Image (tube, rainbow, N blue to C red):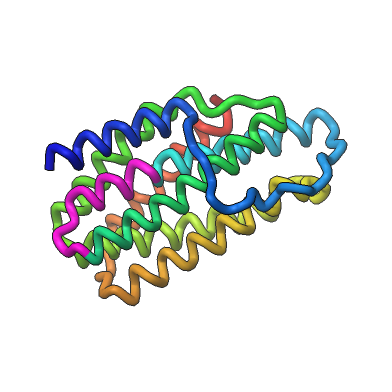
Amino acid sequence: MLDDLIVSFDRALRTLTGVAASARPNPASGLPEPDLPPEQRRHAAGLMRVNHTGEVCAQALYQAQALTARDPEARRQLLRAAMEEAEHLAWTKDRLAELDARPSLVNPLWYAGSFAIGLAAGITGDRTNLGFVVETERQVEEHLTGHMDRLPAADHKSRAIVAAMRDDEVRHGRVARDAGASELPWYVRVLMRAAARAMTISAYRF
């Protein structure tokens, strides 16, 4: 447990200090940088900042859920998903830099809150833990689909990243469902949507 806590602390530092790498190529690599008007560029940056913060939250959630998972296979699945979410973190960070934008200033707050939520989900048992993954990824998929509609049509780089992220999120949810995830109560799903909405608003602006 001590080793796991040390690893979790190390991952938190890496996430919040921007140390993230991707084993897979960035989906936007090789695509030309669009010549966006300033307003569209700011809007694209705001949306990608939201996505980056979402990946910060995902790191915290998966690390906490893996820390409290009882079944070794469930833990391995959570850690595999966390590795892919780390790649998303790297992709969105790179895109923010290309848009001359910074990550959200409230990322440490959202990391801490998400880690606490992940611990709570894991403590309730593996089936609920996996159910939390299913619902999280369902909501993230909807969120990313909305961003595909809202991103400037000419911003093919951001759109390529978001599309690849969405494919991964769908797969994470399917794997968790197949592993025996239980359905979360309706009020938990509502609270999750409210928290996601608060994160979206704060990260877009700050």
Answer left or right for 160 relative to 30: left
Viewer-proximal residue among 108 and 33: 33
Residue at x 83% of width, y 44% of height = 32
Residue 35 lies, with reference to residue 130, above or below; the image says: above
Answer left or right for 51 relative to 15: right
Specify the principal SS of the magenta part.
Answer: helix
Q: Position of residue 137 (x, y in %)?
A: 43, 59
Residue 13 seen by the camera: yes
The boundaries of the magenta stretch are 59-72
Q: Magenta segment: does it hold 34? A: no
Residue at x 14% of width, y 52% of height = 123
Answer left or right for 30 relative to 63: right
Q: Magenta segment: does it hold 66? A: yes
Examine the image and state in which quarter residue 17 appears: top left
Viewer-proximal residue among 73 and 103: 73
Residue at x 78% of width, y 46% of height = 155
Give the number of marks: 0
Q: Position of residue 35 (x, y in %)?
A: 87, 36
